Image (cartoon, coloured by chain):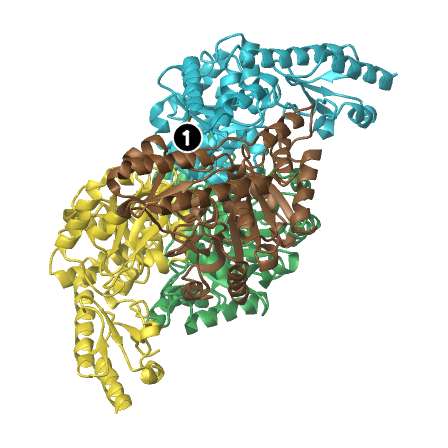
Chain colours: A brown, B cyan, C yellow, D green
Amino acid sequence: MKRTFASDNYAGVHPEVMQALLDANQGHAASYGNDDHTTKAIEKFKGLFGDDVEVFFAYNGTAANVLGLSALTRSYNSIICSDLAHINVDESTAPEKFLGCKLITIKTADGKIYPTEIEERIQRVDDQHHPQVKGISISQSTEYGTVYTRKQIEALSAIAKKHNLYLHMDGSRISNACVSLGESFRSFTRDAGVDVLSFGGTKNGMMFGEAIVFFNSATAVDFKFIRKQGMQLHSKMRFISSQFNALLSNDLWKRNAQHSNNMARFLAEELRKFSQVEITQSVDANGVFAKFPPEIIPKLQDEHFFYMWTDKIFEARLMCAFDTTEDEIRNFGNRLRELLR
Amino acid sequence: MKRTFASDNYAGVHPEVMQALLDANQGHAASYGNDDHTTKAIEKFKGLFGDDVEVFFAYNGTAANVLGLSALTRSYNSIICSDLAHINVDESTAPEKFLGCKLITIKTADGKIYPTEIEERIQRVDDQHHPQVKGISISQSTEYGTVYTRKQIEALSAIAKKHNLYLHMDGSRISNACVSLGESFRSFTRDAGVDVLSFGGTKNGMMFGEAIVFFNSATAVDFKFIRKQGMQLHSKMRFISSQFNALLSNDLWKRNAQHSNNMARFLAEELRKFSQVEITQSVDANGVFAKFPPEIIPKLQDEHFFYMWTDKIFEARLMCAFDTTEDEIRNFGNRLRELLR
Amino acid sequence: MKRTFASDNYAGVHPEVMQALLDANQGHAASYGNDDHTTKAIEKFKGLFGDDVEVFFAYNGTAANVLGLSALTRSYNSIICSDLAHINVDESTAPEKFLGCKLITIKTADGKIYPTEIEERIQRVDDQHHPQVKGISISQSTEYGTVYTRKQIEALSAIAKKHNLYLHMDGSRISNACVSLGESFRSFTRDAGVDVLSFGGTKNGMMFGEAIVFFNSATAVDFKFIRKQGMQLHSKMRFISSQFNALLSNDLWKRNAQHSNNMARFLAEELRKFSQVEITQSVDANGVFAKFPPEIIPKLQDEHFFYMWTDKIFEARLMCAFDTTEDEIRNFGNRLRELLR
Amino acid sequence: MKRTFASDNYAGVHPEVMQALLDANQGHAASYGNDDHTTKAIEKFKGLFGDDVEVFFAYNGTAANVLGLSALTRSYNSIICSDLAHINVDESTAPEKFLGCKLITIKTADGKIYPTEIEERIQRVDDQHHPQVKGISISQSTEYGTVYTRKQIEALSAIAKKHNLYLHMDGSRISNACVSLGESFRSFTRDAGVDVLSFGGTKNGMMFGEAIVFFNSATAVDFKFIRKQGMQLHSKMRFISSQFNALLSNDLWKRNAQHSNNMARFLAEELRKFSQVEITQSVDANGVFAKFPPEIIPKLQDEHFFYMWTDKIFEARLMCAFDTTEDEIRNFGNRLRELLR
């Protein structure tokens, strides 16, 4: 299939990750994480975030989010997030079913949520009739391709601490955010006050696998049971761990994320050449959101598939992946030029 | 790590499966199963079981079981299984949490459950106070390495139909059962009255991935939602599908299963040479259960690791995998000879 | 304690209901609903709604709502309701925990939700990633003391049918709505297209007890199991049933509701005498919503307690019950006059 | 209806309890437990069990059990109980659905479970694959009408403490146990090491209402949310509290329990006169279990209804209530004599 702008999960597996899978496929290994690859992968995460973090691997991002939040909440709690949050609109009702919690949403214009909006929603504290807010969940980068600054995250975590809430980060595209900010992973997560992080692997060149990173080990104390009950414990764990080992070696995570971010920027530049196209969001990471003239959209999708984001206003989402090429973007520009003539 | 008798999930990925993964890693592919590899894999399953079956892929066996059962039950139901069933003792409380159902267990001597035992447990039908039996779940091959005959399954399914229950099969090792019986997959599943099957991939040479096969499409009508909510929908689905394509091509499933079964039989023969060792179960598939003199167990495990199954009676479980070799078994025999001298 | 405007559940038990409890307390009666009082109570409901309805009793309104919705949904569904709906803000996370479903809320100005608002929220139908809308839940009378007209309900049910949704009515104050509309219970529920109704008893003079009425018996087929599992099956059922028998005899439900509605109207008239007080909602049933000058609120509450509804705008909720008296309202008016002087 | 031996919940409400309901029905009272009756009732429980206990009221015994256990467990836990425990066989799958936990059952001969049986079932501690035992639940008096001695309970609590488990007591008939033992409530509950108690009201003469008593206030810290989410918070709470006030005043609990126990003993004596009738359990509380000649059972039930307990062996359960009379027992004896002639 031709490369598309549909999603970073349309891309395959990066060759270095694939090689790591081949290398890991030697002889027997203890299952369920009691193997050397897993030990090494956990060490790599500790290198990034500190020796005292707790790290667990799961299959996909929905699970990483839901199980991570499960460690932070009881079923009578609520969690504040944006109305576009993946946990709110793209994980079926996994959060409600698995956690029992209610999601309290904030209508977002840029994919982010802000302290005052959050404080307005911390209501009826200690009132037994009402869901009790216990968590704030943000996506980094956001579903709109924007990136929270470290300061913005610190402001959220200050609110969280003030109200005795946990701050959860859905980092399915955290590497894209990291290169966008030009800071260490740690600076805008743990050091900025995040409590639990879903660290994405799949969208950045892995075949499958996400990590749940607990910055406060007390919150992780029974997480192994939660993961197993959540049907997310892989038997042949070395095949998740070795992928993370590849991703976190030789800056592969950074090279992949940098490339996809660069491609998004390049695509945005291309689009800005057209007065009929309006870019609707800041292009901070690897996604471009833009409005196109409605009559050309089907024809554009035909050759370079992408998804519509907000049908009503003809806003499309174009995602770049680690393997997106400048040529494809130029072709897309040419096709656009042709259609707009 | 040295090859062991610990579990068939200590083994890695069969080279033909790995090659399929490499081959599938070309360009972009639509995510969540809308790709050619998935179409092809589903066709292969239809070839095995009939054109009108419904097939879904999930990450692991726990999920395949729990989600498959979820399609058959409501939360006030109960499910009858053996006390050794994986769903009862090795899936944390995923069945209870996700289904809400109670498992009603039958103490098993050989890993199997039988019609009269089941009928005794179908109690208080229509009594609102009591969990209402709705399913029977069996493992094929069983956790004791034994294999139900087609006739035994038909007898169970007759009971199921008589009482308006569903018959679920945990087939995490179904290929081993299939070669053991020398029949087609279909003959002892769909044609014998099974309603839903967890078809195992991981333990037979795949990296990850199991299939849930519904023989009555009406029961699968909303399963895509159940799978997504169950956090088991893989984005880069082609990497599960292509593994199944390899497994179901060129009889790889059969070669792998036949080999591991053969190795188990060879191991059993080796053990039978020792009067101090007692084989406790019929060696129908790829597992051997045997009692060893307690004093030699730690030393035996030291060189050829295996797990104890029933500590009290010094019963061990020795599993053979697709990559177990005759040499290893001979070495094990030699070590045993040495220790028993 | 002095009578207040705090809530209709601050009121006690109507003497005729109490007498029915005394009368029912004769000798033994079969438990769990197999008694004559229950048979008779169900007959009374059938008299109101039709011979083919199914009726179940539960302890309280939260349970009536959650269990009724449970019969209509599976856990991957969502339910549309107003942001002020009792199920959304006053039932902890019972709906999420027990149903697994997400509530999709519509910001309401008058306590009601409207067809176009609902249709906007029926999104991503058949998309496995997204909660699938299956129900609309409305409150009659609403949490804002307003009452849907029969036409409004028919319009909602038309939307429901068009999109294959169920229409659920939280009728914890349905008798107040009924007398307000001046129609039969049936006309604005079953005949207007409602599928399941929570019929309130407690707030209209009962000690405890609500009814769940299914207008389509197919949806109730396993409800007895759902109720028992929901911990809502009363053993000495005659003591719920006999209360309903009293409420539905000699028009007690109507007398109580008419009285509390009249008192609300009388209170509203009293408040309208004060230019500093603004009535914010139509007084259709037994609640009055009004803004008071902030400085007098604590003093007002001191003698005639009521709850604040929207703190920010100093909006209070004043509820009238079957036992509210004109004198109390006049006293409240006098106190108000005194404080505003 | 004639009085029967069917169940203590076939009996009605004791006149003193009914009078308390009448007395409580004066004017308005704050809802949800913020009323004087509730304050007083809680004080009465503190008088029985100590000033630092936490007490909550719920509607019925199933809820008291399930919610109490909910405060002690997380969803990956298991709870050990007898196979006849009410939570195992008479509460639908409320425990599984609401807790997520698995019940691990011990086949009981006398309704009780014993330390060695429990220790055998504490398996695979800290093994993520396996449900982690966290609670022991016993019924006092048991479903077989027997009563644990204080010593037996202490032995169970010693096991619980040793393995870091909680000890839960289903005391739906705790008053019967209390008078049987001739000790204070506290001696065989809190002082014997019980952590949480369901204190039964309904079966001992109340209309509805059970109490959940936490002996360690730390375990109750969020229980108000659990109760509300569990749909068990009564609005007009004074009508549960005032019943408990009556039950715990003037030794009503004791008079009722003593009477029903006496009647059971009297009934047992009557039955012992017949060589064809075999009493199968120790008559410690208010239930008598006896085998009758099968051919006379329907005729016996016809005039003095009772339920069969174990059909296979023609074992019946005959329950006595606070209003059972000696005459009824004599009539039963006469009928029996007549039928056995």
Name the residue beneath numbered marker 1: B30
Residue B188 in percent (x, y) is at 47, 13
Look at the picture and state if A13 lies above or below A221: above
| Residue at the farthest left position | C182
Left or right: residue A41 versus residue D305 is right
Between residues B319 and C172, which one lies in front from this camera angle?
B319
The residue under the point 52% across, 17% down is B246
D157 to B87, vertically: above or below: below
Residue C198 spot, x, y in % from top left: 27, 53
Q: What kind of residue is marked 1?
A: Ala
Q: Mark yes or no: residue B132 visible.
A: no
Q: Nearer the viewer, residue D274 or C136?
A: C136
Q: Chain of mark 1?
A: B
Q: Position of residue C144 (x, y in %)?
A: 25, 65
Residue C277 position in % (x across, y down): 23, 80
Residue at 54% in and 10% down: B181
Q: Residues within 10 Å of mark 1 (few under 14, many from 20)?
A: many
Q: How many marks?
A: 1
Q: Quadrant of the C terminus of chain B?
A: top right
